[in-house]
Amino acid sequence: MIRQVHQEDIDLWEVWIEYDQFNPKKFGTLYVLGEILTDHSSTRNAIKMSGASKDKQLVLQVPEKPSGRCRMTEVYYAEPIEDLNQYASISIYAGTQLVATIDEIEVMI
């Protein structure tokens, strides 16, 4: 389940894990894909890992909504994971504002 706090700021978030049968040390890769409002500067590394908590929550940070003219930009985050149950949920923040919480992570095998 995805709970979005500000629909006008964030249109879409998708989260999934792709199983990697060729890497015995990792289960696969976690992908987070979303859309954010940005100014016209580069959006490279727009999603950054803020940390992971003891309760298996991944915390990601995106840039705050700029003032003035902005555009919708697709951004992504990817991380190799060792265990399918490494994260139970993902929270995405823009500054100190919670933008979305994802409680269900789809697994693609």
Image (cartoon, rainbow, N blue to C red):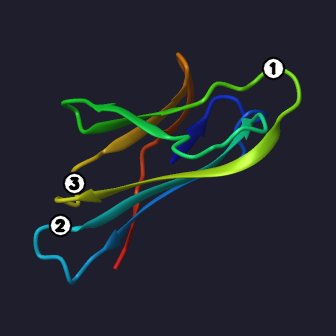
Of the numbered discs 2 and 1, the one sitting upstream in the chain is: 2
Label 3: which residue?
85
Label 2: which residue?
26
Residue at horizontal 31 percent and vertical 36 percent from the top: 57
Tell whether 25 sits left or right of 77. Answer: left
Residue at horizontal 11 percent and vertical 76 percent from the top: 24
Residue type, numbered disc 1: Ser
Could you tell me which secondary element the residue under label 3 belongs to? loop
Label 1: which residue?
67
Residue type, numbered disc 2: Lys
Relative image position of residue 101 (x, y in whole percent): 49, 37
State the count of labels: 3
State which mark lies toward you, 2 or 1.
Answer: 1
Residue type, numbered disc 3: Asn
Q: Contact, CB < 8 Å: mark 2 with mark 3?
A: no
Which dot marks residue 46? none
Relative image position of residue 97 (x, y in whole percent): 57, 19
Q: Is residue 21 above or below residue 94?
A: below
The Cα–Cα distance between marks 2 and 3, rounded to whole angstroms, is: 12 Å
Residue at horizontal 55 percent and vertical 19 percent from the top: 95
State which mark lies toward you, 2 or 3.
Answer: 2
